[in-house]
């Protein structure tokens, strides 16, 4: 839709905002209220959409154009010295940030990004919509400059009354309960952590916090013995930052699963590259798993459940 395309060209920082359609509608309604545009009858609106948007608008021509702001007259802080390179929409956002930095220079604590965004823009989601990673304006301005940081989604974990032990991350939530319950007596791990499947790939900062809170030593991982379950910890290690923990395979439990686990059929396993199994489990166990995949089989981690753990 051309209307959306033009809007996102003017405001690129909003393109990935979850409320972008509602924000566009509010902007159109505001323009209509001032008489700058006319909205069509409801028959010319989208039939679907949350919210539905007009399929066209009519511009109301006027000779009374508002004067454009001269951004060169703004006393820009050095951190925003790149302001001449910004679009008009970005300049409006940069101006708010500039005013904030002028007022708060030398008096900043690091606080969550939504709290800082509300202070600067009166909109707690604006900075999140603008950022690329931990920077703004295509990498030109760090969130650290604003005293802001992104808060990782928390990782559920069940601690045990023992420190100085590894953490065990498990892929699935039923296994999280079983290992967590068993570990209350076994005391093998300082905590059992719920990895939440594929969501675990981006939880390095949260895992670092858990490791610190329970005073653990290192982190082991156990997941399904299928291509996806093997790929999750490999992806995690590749994407985690240098100051975030890496995970290693919980070899004892992988060995048990390969020896005793219930095998299920899954034809897509034959498409998996065997090297990923070797990269995660090493040559011996990795090749054993690759052979399992070639036979269209995999093993769910639930095969090692609470009853099996209790019997060990």
Image (cartoon, helix red, strand yellow):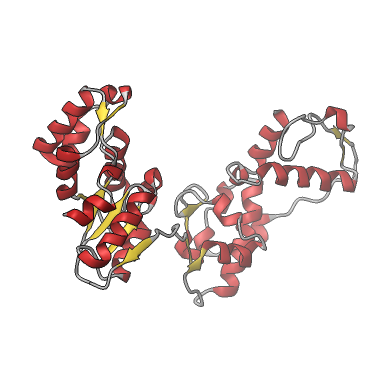
Residue 234: percent from left, percent from top: 26, 42
Of 138 and 182, nearer the camera is 182
The residue depicted at 26 percent of the width and 42 percent of the height is 303
- Quarter of the rendering containing residue 156: bottom left
Point out the image quarter for the N terminus: top right
> In the current view of this chain or complex, which residue is farthest to the left?
284
List x then y, in percent, for residue 202. 38, 49
Q: Position of residue 129 (x, y in %)?
A: 57, 50
Q: Is residue 76 visible?
A: no
Seen at 31% across and 67% down, the residue is 159
Q: Is residue 293 above or below residue 311?
A: above
At x 71%, y 55%, the residue is: 70
Residue 32 in picture, x, y percent from top left: 87, 43
Viewed as shown, does residue 130 lie left or right of 245? right
Instruction: Inspect this view and state whether residue 196 appears.
Output: yes
Number of numbered discs on residues: 0
Name above or below for residue 16 compared with residue 166.
Answer: above
179 and 118: which one is in front?
179
Q: Nearer the viewer, residue 63 or 223?
A: 223
Picture quarter with the C terminus: bottom left
Q: Is residue 309 left or right of residue 36?
A: left
Q: Is residue 80 above or below residue 308?
A: below
Q: In the rendered image, which quarter is residue 215 located in?
A: bottom left
């Amino acid at each position: 839709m051309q209307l959306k395309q033009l809007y996102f060209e003017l405001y690129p920082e909003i393109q990935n905002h979850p409320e972008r359609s509602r924000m566009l509608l509010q902007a159109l309604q505001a323009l209509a209220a001032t008489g700058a545009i006319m909205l069509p009858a409801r028959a010319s609106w989208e039939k679907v959409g949350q919210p539905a948007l007009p399929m066209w608008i009519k511009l109301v021509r006027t000779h009374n154009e508002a004067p454009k702001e001269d951004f060169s007259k703004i006393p820009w802080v050095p951190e925003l010295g790149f302001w001449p390179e910004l679009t008009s929409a970005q300049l409006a956002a940069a101006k708010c940030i500039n005013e904030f930095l002028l007022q708060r220079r030398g008096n900043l604590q690091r606080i969550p990004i939504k709290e800082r965004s509300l202070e600067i823009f009166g909109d707690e989601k604006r900075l999140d919509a603008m950022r690329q990673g931990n920077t703004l304006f295509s990498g030109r301005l760090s969130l650290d400059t604003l005293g802001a940081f992104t808060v990782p989604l928390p990782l559920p974990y069940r601690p045990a009354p023992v420190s100085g032990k590894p953490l065990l991350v498990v892929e699935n939530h039923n296994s999280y309960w079983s290992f967590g319950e068993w570990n209350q007596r076994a005391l093998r791990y300082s905590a059992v952590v719920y990895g939440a499947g594929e969501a675990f790939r981006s939880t390095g900062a949260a895992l670092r916090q858990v490791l610190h809170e329970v005073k653990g030593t290192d982190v082991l991982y156990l997941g399904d013995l299928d291509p996806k379950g093997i790929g999750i910890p490999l992806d995690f290690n590749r994407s985690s930052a240098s100051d975030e923990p890496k995970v290693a395979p919980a070899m004892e439990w992988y060995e048990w699963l390969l020896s005793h686990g219930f095998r299920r059929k899954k034809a897509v396993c034959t498409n998996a590259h065997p090297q990923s199994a070797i990269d995660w489990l090493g040559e011996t166990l990795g090749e054993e798993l690759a052979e399992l995949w070639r036979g269209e089989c995999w093993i769910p981690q639930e095969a090692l459940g609470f009853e099996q753990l209790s019997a060990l």
